[in-house]
Image (cartoon, helix red, strand yellow):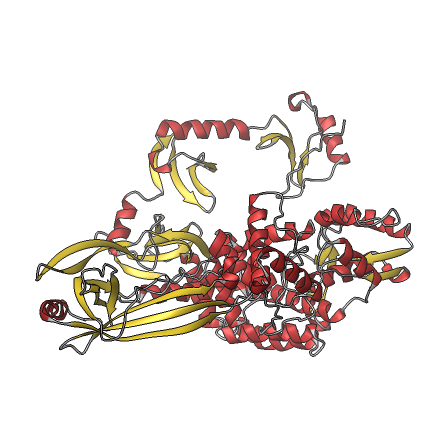
Amino acid sequence: MESPGKVKTIKSFLGDDFKVMSSQGHIRDIEPLGKNSLGIDIEHGYAPNYVIDANKEHLVEELRREVAKSEVVWLASDEDREGEAIAWHLYHVLNLQNKETHRIVFSSITKSDVLDGIANPRDIDYNLVNAQQARRVLDRIVGFELSPVLWKKVTTGLSAGRVQSVAVRLIVEKEREIESFRASSAYRTFADFIGINPGDASVLKCELNHRFSHKKDAIEFLESLNSAQFIVRDVQRKPVTHLPAPPFTTSTLQQEAARKLKFSVSKTMRIAQSLYENGHITYMRTDSVNLSALALATCKEVITEQYGAEYLHTRQYRTKSKGAQEAHEAIRPAYMSRLSAGANRDEQRLYELIWKRTIASQMAEAQSEKTTIEVSVHGSKYAFVATGEVITFDGFTRVYVQSTDEGEDERRILPAMSPRERLRLQGAEAVQTYVKPPFRYNDATLVKRMEELGIGRPSTYATIIDTIQHVKYVEKGSVPGVKRDITILTLKNGMVQEKQKTELYGADTQRFLPTDLGRMTNDFLVAHFPEILSYDFTAHEEEQFDRIAAGKADWVKTVDTFYQKFQPLVTAVPGGKVEGRFLGNDPETGLPITAKISKIGPCVQMGDAADAKPRFASLKKNQSIYSITLAEALELFKTALPLTLGEYQGQEVVVGEGKYGPYVHYDKLFISIPKGKDPLTLTMDEAIALIEEKQISSTPIHQWGDVQVLNGRYGAYIHTPEGNYQLPKSTDPAALNEAEVRDIIAKSEPIKPGKRTFRRKSAK
């Protein structure tokens, strides 16, 4: 088994003849990147150098022991490319070529599916394995080659990904589209009509079929209504059939859960994984909308019993997306008769969404009557129009209505009207409205757009979205918007009255926003790697992976074709840092001021590399290097770090800010300022206290030549030129002598840099 979550469920289905164990995901991967090690032998067919995960070595030994005691081994990892690769790695690492080994898969963790999988084993699908290898190798090459370029050109610590960088490009381009958008306004005219007979009380709400560009024209039209006659010119009634949406694929589940449940993509996949592992739904990574014959039959039973035969319409959907695998099923409940499932409220809500979507897909179409009423205005070339819709048979909508990306359409019921009927104006107004800017991406719309462009695959969307946020290229946040005045013209007592109303425009909540770092990185990559960052090229690579998975392309040739195109672009990148945005010169010193990305993040710089000491000031949270003005930058320098507090024992005390936060610099010491303390308000006395505390902790407890016993952040330790050594538990560092310290060194291994050692409590 691949996941430990499945073990308990599957154990309950099988007898004592089976031992069910989990590999806990991948047990090996391409070796970690070294200073000069790619982990891939480019000269010999791009062969990856696979190594066992250090954290899985104990598990692998345990699996090997159990394999040695077994007669038959069943590899039951997931049925996608990652799952197939896991089975292949297990086959090699556990030396299963000498054992009777079967590869089995099941679309749901139910007893019938598990037993059916065991009854129908197959071989490892090497096409799927090679498709996974091709993706993994390409991603490693791009990351290895591009990241050092970004360090030199933009700032240290950056990373680039083949698909992630294209996703960032989508968000950056959307933001620039919004920034360049210039809203134009027009006047929309609305009117309420009633019949001329005393008993006609129903109000017909209409909108004019024309928008006025200027207030003067809107006023003139409203005034003309005082003497106009209004007649129902036309009434159109048209039957409309609404079809249910197909069952969920991975991407449509991610989109609908974001719209209806406000779940992020990663949260949706995490919850779906739990539902799958506990036997509640079928496999949640699929691009198919197929339902099995069993699912269709059980849907029929539930619909007939719950809603009646008139609500039943069995249908099979066909997947239109490229590379879809029709052998897989859509995401559906494992048991359609189970109306609810899940260990917590989030699981129950997602299960309910899946159940409703699946059932609705097999229900009758909804029938409605769409009515359009047109009201003529005597003497005018314009007309008022009202549109409404009446549901005549609810069909599948009794269970489920699919959401739209920006809100559902309003359906209004119109009063009964007949052609040539005369109407009386009850009221009218013209409202100034502005064209809305493009919407920023949220989880649902970003997944939808990536799928439309063929970027990534449904199983990778969650990872892509999480990664671009983790590396700080994109953040999910809100935009407060800006207030503006709009004009409302109202026809009242034969006169047009004008009033102003304030509205908020440009506000957005929980949308993806590019950071300055993301923008600058994107701009550099698009400028120097335009083809690699193009949407068409990225989609083409995904299609190549699909061809490899189908046995129609060779994975090594696919990787080589990419590399031969990509590598020359890397070597052609010119030297020098990416220039910042020049804002102007400081009025006092004449030094240039530039907005840029540095080790401390988005900042403004006074002076350049030729100056002895350029000054830096970090931008505030709501500022951007792409919009900050010279005046705003000068204000930042008034309170910018570094600040000199004074002298202590003949040495300057300076408060500065670095990659890891604010610090006090004194002599050769750099002391971090505690979190929560504003470095700009740090007093000299507080700085001296930090310095003295650091001096005490830096003073050796013992010293014998190059060997020292020091106080560290996590307790006392031994320091030597060859490395640091941990003291045995319960050792009193003050009581140690030189012989004891050198004995500890002789019997111990140095502590690896960056690693903390935790002692595990013994079991009682």
Front residue of 497 and 541: 497
Front residue of 538 and 231: 231
Counting from the top left corner in percent of width and height, residue 316 is at 62, 70
**Which residue occupies 25% across, 58% down?**
585
Which image quadrant is residue 247 in?
A: bottom right
Counting from the top left corner in percent of width and height, residue 491 is at 13, 61
Counting from the top left corner in percent of width and height, residue 274 is at 64, 49
Of the 4 image quadrants, the one containing the C terminus is top right
Q: Is residue 565 found left or right of 496 in the rendered image?
A: right
Instruction: State the residue lying farthest toward the top.
Output: 735
**Which residue occupies 26% across, 48% down?**
635
Q: Is residue 436 found left or right of 430 in the rendered image?
A: right
Q: Is residue 355 found left or right of 436 in the rendered image?
A: right
Q: Is residue 271 above or below residue 741?
A: below
Counting from the top left corner in percent of width and height, residue 306 is at 59, 55
Q: Is residue 458 visible?
A: yes
Q: How many marks?
A: 0
Q: Is residue 369 above or below residue 157?
A: below
Q: Is residue 346 above or below residue 164?
A: above
Which image quadrant is residue 224 in?
A: bottom left
Front residue of 755 and 308: 308
Q: Is residue 708 visible?
A: no
